[in-house]
Amino acid sequence: MINSALRKQIKHYQNEYLKAKAAVEVIREINKANSQKVLNAGNYINEFTGERITEPEQDYCMSGEDFKNYIYSVYEENKKAGLMVYDPNRVPEADFLAELKHAEDTLLKLQLEIIPTELKENIKKAQQHWKYRDEAINLILRLEV
């Protein structure tokens, strides 16, 4: 049986997690669209093949100077798009990633409080394993409190 204070905590962090996750996804989409816009407008060349870079996933192939210009241009586009960015060398979703991580960690701790004692060690191991961490988070998110 889960007491009401624990229910409130779980519900609160479920909401925090979902808000931060949504913010991260939206910011990443806006950043990707702005990166594509900058690449379409500019002439960035792949150092290895000599071809024009047309996809944001290939930006690591630019020369160092081109990359600096590209990053600053994307930063300016992100500011125009209304993203709260303060530094061109920092990913735009960094603040929300920190919130997301905090909500995840808290949910996982709360999960340990509501499971039977004999399962705690196994669940702790699963929470720390990269492959099963998301599954553990999905379980606590699906919990209706």
Image (cartoon, grey):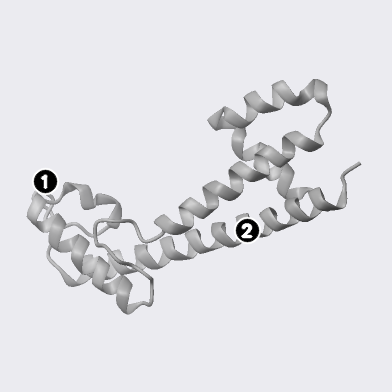
Q: Position of residue 21 (x, y in %)?
A: 55, 57
Q: Quadrant of residue 68?
A: bottom left
Residue farthest front in this picture: 5
Residue at point 81%, 20% (across, down): 118
Q: Which secondary structure lies at badge 1?
A: loop
Q: Can you see residue 94? A: yes
**Depth order, front residue of 49/92:** 92
Residue at point 62%, 58% (across, down): 16
Q: Position of residue 112 (x, y in %)?
A: 73, 34
Please tell me the numbered disc located at residue 27.
none
Q: Please give the count of numbered marks on the rendered protein.
A: 2
Instruction: Decide which of tag 2 and tag 1 comes sooner along the chain.
Output: 2
Label 1 neighbour load within 10 Å: few <14, some 14-19, many 20+? few
Q: Position of residue 58 (x, y in %)?
A: 24, 50
Disc 2 versus disc 1: distance between alpha carbons?
45 Å
Residue at point 19%, 57% (across, down): 53
Q: Is residue 119 above or below residue 33?
A: above
Q: Can you see residue 144? A: no
**Depth order, front residue of 2/94:** 2
Residue farthest right in this picture: 1
Q: Which secondary structure lies at badge 2?
A: helix
Q: Is residue 41 left or right of residue 84?
A: left
Residue at point 20%, 68% (across, down): 73
Q: Position of residue 72 (x, y in %)?
A: 19, 65
Q: Amino acid at mark 1?
A: Thr
Q: Quadrant of residue 88?
A: bottom left
Q: Is residue 99 left or right of residue 144?
A: left
Q: Which residue is mark 2?
A: 16
Q: Which residue is mark 1?
A: 49
Say which quadrant the N terminus sits in: top right
